[in-house]
């Protein structure tokens, strides 16, 4: 029997109308009189991706109350911030492609990409101020701080190659889960949910975000490209993620020196990187990370199950499953 896989369309079903209206709302938020910026913004809108973050805002609002104008503001804030950080990430990583499209820095060079990212961030802040959403602005500003700290912490630890499991979870909370937690918290705030429900949904977003990032980290070891091999991009960029962190803790000192030598000195050598990937799999790094991801998935589901049954809750449950079963 074939089991139908959950799609983003299935997840959006209870908020289909709101997401359609949001597309127009977000397009208006990106408007500018500067021709170059307008061209780049239209390119960004065209390749907008799955819009997971606004979906989370709307579903969290619907779960805990009524979607209203404040919810659209919250969804715009989070999407603008997310888009700005992706653009800046591509500059930092010198990445010239994202989701099969050329990145902004590939098409318009680094200077324009940095400035566009700054523009989008400032637009988010102004939307919050123009709508007197000072509470939303505070929550979002904290997320910006957390994300910046997370990226810098990863940079610092990557140089020394001394990331522990505890530090790893701190990094992925800050750089990924903090914004997802902001989406679910802002959705609840916009719907005037109780303080208790706001905190529950924030925690739900945190657990979902951690599971989401672990899935991304597993892709580096498991995802099959056009030549049927894992990408190994994290190793090539000297980033230690949980599969390797776990194995480094479990192996002998001699094996540890060999593994770290590949990350330090041979991280651009595809053969050596593939040897390390195979070693991590053999020593249980993938299995351990998958187990941890399932733990966080269950924590997220446990929180959702505290809420009454509804279309919104059902969609959020589907979104949790989608997060850890996705192929990209």
Image: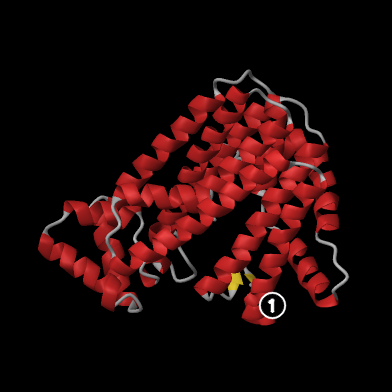
Image height of 50 relative to 257, above or below: above
Which residue has dot 1 on it? 112
Foreground of the two, 189 or 236:
189
Residue at image position (85%, 62%) is 31
Image height of 276 relative to 222, above or below: below
Q: Is residue 167 left or right of residue 76?
A: left
Q: In this view of the protein, can residue 295 be seen by the observer?
A: yes
Indicate the position of residue 209 as horizontal and vertical percent values.
51, 44
Indicate the position of residue 135 as horizontal and vertical percent values.
68, 39
Indicate the position of residue 66 as horizontal and vertical percent values.
77, 27
Q: Is residue 230 left or right of residue 287?
A: right
Residue at image position (72%, 37%) is 58
Give the residue furthest to the top.
308
Numbered disc 1: secondary structure = helix
Residue at image position (77%, 44%) is 73
Image height of 294 relative to 172, above or below: above
- Which coloring applies here? secondary structure
Quadrant, the N terminus: top right
Give the residue furthest to the right.
33
Q: In this view of the protein, can residue 229 be seen by the observer?
A: no
Q: Is residue 114 left or right of residue 295?
A: right
Mark 1, other Cα within 10 Å: few <14 / some 14–19 / many ≥20: some
Q: State which quadrant residue 55 falls in.
A: top right
Residue at image position (58%, 53%) is 144
């Amino acid at each position: 029997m074939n089991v139908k896989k959950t799609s983003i369309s299935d997840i959006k079903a209870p908020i289909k109308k709101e997401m359609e209206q949001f597309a127009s709302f977000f397009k208006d938020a990106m408007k500018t009189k500067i021709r170059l910026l307008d061209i780049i913004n239209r390119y960004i809108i065209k390749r907008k991706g799955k819009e997971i973050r606004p979906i989370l805002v709307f579903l969290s609002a619907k779960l805990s109350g009524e979607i209203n104008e404040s919810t659209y503001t919250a969804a715009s804030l989070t999407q603008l911030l997310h888009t700005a950080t992706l653009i800046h990430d591509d500059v930092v990583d010198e990445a010239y492609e994202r989701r099969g499209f050329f990145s902004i820095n590939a098409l318009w060079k680094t200077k324009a990409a940095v400035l566009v990212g700054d523009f989008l961030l400032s637009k988010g802040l102004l939307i919050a101020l123009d709508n007197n959403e000072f509470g939303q602005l505070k929550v979002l500003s904290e997320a910006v701080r957390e994300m910046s700290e997370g990226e810098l912490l990863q940079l610092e630890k990557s140089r020394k190659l001394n990331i522990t499991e505890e530090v790893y979870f701190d990094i992925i909370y800050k750089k990924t889960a903090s914004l997802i937690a902001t989406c679910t918290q802002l959705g609840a705030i916009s719907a005037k949910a109780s303080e208790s429900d706001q905190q529950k949904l924030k925690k739900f977003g945190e657990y979902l975000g951690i599971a989401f990032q672990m899935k991304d980290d597993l892709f580096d070891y498991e995802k099959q490209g056009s030549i049927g091999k894992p990408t190994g991009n994290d190793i090539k960029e000297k980033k230690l993620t949980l599969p390797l962190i776990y194995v480094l803790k479990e192996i002998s000192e001699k094996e540890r020196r060999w593994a770290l030598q590949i990350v330090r000195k041979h991280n651009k050598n595809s053969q050596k990187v593939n040897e390390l990937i195979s070693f991590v799999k053999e020593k249980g790094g993938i299995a351990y990370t998958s187990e941890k991801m399932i733990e966080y998935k269950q924590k997220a589901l446990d929180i959702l199950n505290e809420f009454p049954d509804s279309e919104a809750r059902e969609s959020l449950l589907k979104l949790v499953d989608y997060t850890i079963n996705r192929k990209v």
